[in-house]
Image: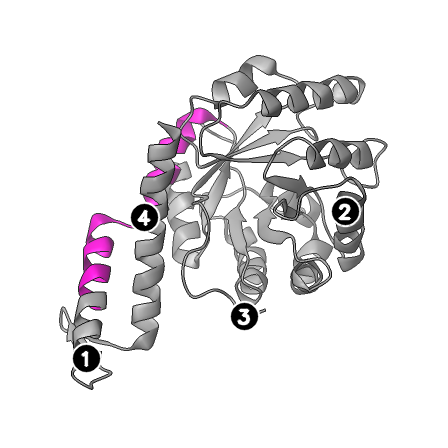
Amino acid sequence: RAPPTDFEGPPRRSVLYMPGSNAKAVAKARTIPADSICIDLEDAVAPAAKKEARMQVLAAIQEGGFGAREIAVRANGLDTPWGADDIAMIAQSGAHAVCLPKVDSMETVIAVHQVMAKAGAPASMALWCMIETPLGVLRAEEICRAGRDSRNGRLTALVMGTSDLTKELRAQHTPDRHAMHTSLQMVLLAARAHGVLALDGVHLNFKDAAEFAAHCRQAKEMGYDGKTLIHPTQVAVANEIFAPTPDQVAESEEIIAAHTAAVAEGENVVVVRGKLVENLHVEEALRVLSMHAAIKELAAGSA
């Protein structure tokens, strides 16, 4: 499928993980201004607590109170004793998306679609695939292709699992993340080629606000749509950095107005702020304005 030319759906500037076994944390998520909440049944839950956490998460989602925020649930992998039951629960929970960890093949994507269909997941329920291994990075394009074809088609996001990937690569955590650059760009290329979102991985040292902000800016400059988070204090920074700036919104409005006027006069090229504007700039301006409108709509719906 060709990638969409404008922004679709709610913003995902900030995707906050919350441990599914911690009822107080999940309840607190209702008051946190993250664009999306991803309730975790995988890494954040001990094996002995998996079943109880699953039922607790189901009750919390069905209770509601999250406003207009998108709710995803990170299941355990299908190769674990808990994955299929997790996905069956999510399918009937009212959540918006299944987040599947450590996806590294198209076969896994096809299998999770089959499990979701068998469990009666609504057609609107999305799939997020986490890319956390070298194989996942190398196969990101086929993962997208499998998740976007006419038989499946639930895939809406690739989520970087940079912590696990760093371990698998035997790399080092550094301020500039140079060890992650190739992987981040390869996954982004696959996402853009197939019209799905790309979400950056977590920043574990949540007390280092300056480095976190730098990583957000780096991801945005690459083209990422948002960042996954581990702490509520990270939400405001991610929301600000991944949102269009007021000047970008103003310039986009100028581009649309100038281009519309030019087309009415039989012209297809116009100059705005001393720069030549062509159709590709108009498409980007439309995307910026669509995202700006979606952010405002989400804020109003979550108030």
- 259 or 190: nearer the viewer: 259
- Residue occupying image coordinates x 36% and y 59%: 287
Quadrant occupied by the C terminus:
top left
Which residue has dot 3 on it? Answer: 2
Which amino acid type corresponds to the residue marked 3 in the rendered image?
A: Ala
- 67 or 127: nearer the viewer: 67
> Label 2 to label 4, Cα distance in Å?
33 Å
- Residue occupying image coordinates x 56% and y 67%: 193
Please tell me which of labels 2 and 4 falls first in the chain.
Answer: 2
Which residue has dot 4 on it? Answer: 293
Quick one: SS at disc 2?
helix
> Label 2 to label 3, Cα distance in Å?
25 Å
Which residue has dot 1 on it? Answer: 264
Which amino acid type corresponds to the residue marked 1 in the rendered image?
A: Ala
Please tell me which of labels 1 and 3 falls first in the chain.
Answer: 3
Quick one: SS at disc 1?
helix
Quadrant occupied by the N terminus:
bottom right
Which residue has dot 2 on it? Answer: 117
Please tell me which of labels 4 and 1 falls first in the chain.
Answer: 1
> Label 3 to label 4, Cα distance in Å?
23 Å
Quick one: SS at disc 3?
loop
Q: Is residue 236 magenta?
A: yes
Q: Which residues are magenta?
A: 231-255
Where residue 258 sits: x, y (%)?
17, 71
Please tell me which of labels 2 and 3 falls first in the chain.
Answer: 3
Which amino acid type corresponds to the residue marked 2 in the rendered image?
A: Ala
Q: Quick check: marks 3 and 4 in contact, CB under 8 Å?
A: no
Please tell me which of labels 3 and 4 falls first in the chain.
Answer: 3
Left or right relative to 119: residue 215: left
